[in-house]
Amino acid sequence: MIDDEGAQLGVMPTEQAQALAQQKGLDLIEVSPTAIPPVCRIGDYGRLKYEQSKKDKDARKKQKNWELREVKLRPKIETHDYETKARMAERLLMDGGKVKVTIMFRGREITYTGFGKRLLDRMSADMAPIAVVERDAKLEGKNMFMILAPRPVPTGPPKFSQHPPTPRPPDAPQTTSADDTEDEFVEAPQGVTTSA
């Protein structure tokens, strides 16, 4: 038997323990029912349940929930589109989720799976500072995919994401003035034409 201040009261009959708890206006809570004799404590049962729910909630917050997000590409993707998709994959990886990179083949494109494999290899190389390849490129039906997982500790900065500029202190002097930003006009020599 443990009282509400944490002091050991020793072994006592159940009726006596219940009477002691009622006298203090608290509950008799069974802490360890499998022990011989069972261990009980005097306390507020509602408060105990509240503290237990807070502990459970904190444990769930600290637990990593891996969310699998997908980035879809085509084998004939242009450079700018690839960079946009890579930037999205970086953002998802930086948020802590796994990314499934899928190459979708249509029609006769399936005969050129080498293009898709090279594209996935390029993506894994570009994401190497912030991600590891969890599952290598695999062809399933008309799609080829691989799965990237975030590194616990990134080995470098992301390749495509823009880094925010460092904020300038409010009392720092201006580095450019209105005179510096005007375009200079240089006159072309006689007889030379310029095309825009």
Image (spheres, rainbow, N blue to C red):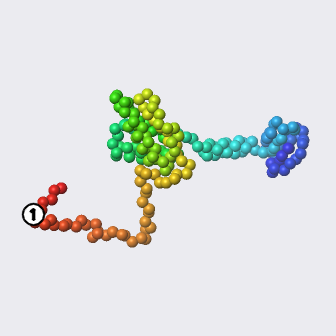
Looking at the image, residue 70 lies above or below residue 155? above
- The percent position of residue 24, horizontal first and vertical second, equals 82, 46
Expressed as whole percent of the image width and height from the top left, the position of residue 145 reads: 45, 35
Q: Residue at x 34, y 46 (%)?
A: 80
Q: Secondary structure at mark 1?
A: loop
Asked if one can make out residue 72 in the rendered structure from this viewpoint, the answer is no
Determine whether, in the image, residue 82 is placed left or right of residue 94: left
Q: Nearer the viewer, residue 138 or 64?
A: 138
Q: Residue drawn at (45%, 46%), measured in percent from left and top?
A: 125
**Which of the 4 image quadrants contains residue 50?**
top right
Q: Which residue is mark 1?
A: 191
Residue 85 pos. (x, y %): 40, 43
> Which residue is rendered at x = 86% and y = 41% of the image?
17
For the N terminus, give its image quadrant. Answer: top right
Q: Is residue 139 left or right of residue 180?
A: right
Q: Residue at x 73, y 44 (%)?
A: 48
